[in-house]
Amino acid sequence: MASYQYRNNHQYDQTRRDQHTRSSDGTASTTYSSSTGRESAATEATEPPTYSKKIVVVGDGGCGKTCLLISYSQGYFPEVWLSLPHPLPWTQTRSHGDEMLTVDKKYVPTVFENYIAYPVHSPSGKTVELALWDTAGQEEYDRLRPLSYPETDLVLVCFAVDCPNSLDNVLDKWYPEVLHFCPYTPLILVGLKTDLRHKKTCIDMLKTQGLTPVTSDQGKAVATKMNAQYMECSSKEAKGVDDIFERAILTVVSNDRRNLESPSGGGGGGRSGSGHVSKSSIPGVGIPKRKKRKCQFL
């Protein structure tokens, strides 16, 4: 499991350039510089962060979770380029300067990836150490994924708008799993890849399967059933990404303050308006697991 630490100001500055260093143990660190010469407030801070919070991201494999985290923490949409001697069946050749490179179209699933960012809690101006936990959505990692859940402050439950089945799996798989391991943790349902919602190739491909892209209203309806907030974004176009994490930060810091002000001084946050959740009331707990639905991601 690689651990990544990123320091930036979480703004999508097209002129930023990043330098990567990787040690022998696989740990990577990334620093950014911009054309304006400004450095991140986190790098200039002399005091430790006021808040330390953990966010776990779950959802079907290939729905865009890793791209969401990289787009937020690093400020760019990740594309994998490989210099190969000849094109392979799953590669696409493109011209890149004086060289012919091939873009790797083969999907490599995440197992566990950790990212650390240092955003600012807008109302207070205080720095937050935000640990972002990426998880594997494939069924073969179902027994490992629960290792990510302890001490989680908020869960982003993700689906892709170009794959209606990934939204079905939210209620069939992800919501019951999260409720089982994090019954008091606030949730945000996140619709990813909104740039594909109106893309003709996506619409045509889904049409052959008798499907259509997921609408905002469909996502909101599922979020209501989960007693969760609902948000959408396009990591590729950098639309709505910062808004999601701004909402997440406001939620976890608000819960932190609420716990400190409560007479008991404790508690686990929880979803708005929700009380104690017993396992008997959790959908899917104690019920035979349904086979997870699958679809092809663009």
Image (tube, helix red, strand yellow):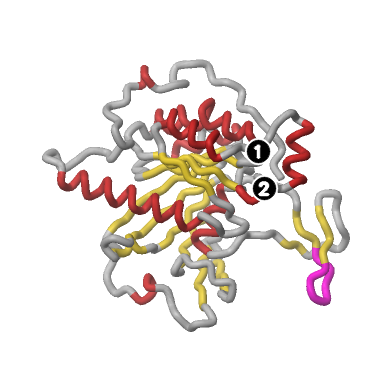
Q: Is residue 77 something one can see in this rendering?
A: yes
Q: Residue furthest right?
A: 86
| Amino acid residing under circle 1 | Pro
Asked where in the image residue 124 lies, by quadrant, the reply is: bottom left
- Disc tally is 2
Q: Is residue 295 above or below residue 57?
A: above
Q: Is residue 214 left or right of residue 49?
A: right
CA–CA distance in space, label 1 to label 2:
8 Å
Q: Nearer the viewer, residue 170 or 194?
A: 194
Pick the front one: 8 or 24: 8
Q: Secondary structure at mark 1?
A: loop
- Residue 98 in the magenta stretch? The answer is yes
* Side of 197 relative to 205 (left or right): left
At 51% from the left and 54% from the top, the residue drawn is 240
Picture layout, residue 293 above or below residue 194: above
Residue indicated by mark 1: 213
Q: Residue at x 52, y 16 (%)?
A: 288
Start-end of magenta stretch: 95-101
The amino acid marked with disc number 2 is Leu
Which one is earlier in the sequence, the residue at label 1 or at label 2?
2
Evaluate if marks 1 and 2 touch, with contact meaning CB atoms under 8 Å apart: yes
Q: Residue at x 43, y 78 (%)?
A: 39
Q: Foreground: 39 or 133?
A: 39
Q: Quadrant of residue 48?
A: bottom left
Residue 148 visible in the snapshot? no
What x and y, as percent, mark residue 61?
A: 61, 40
- Residue in view at x 27 percent, y 46 percent: 255
The x and y percentages for residue 51 are: 29, 57
Helix, strand or loop status at disc 2: helix
Residue 196: assigned label: 2
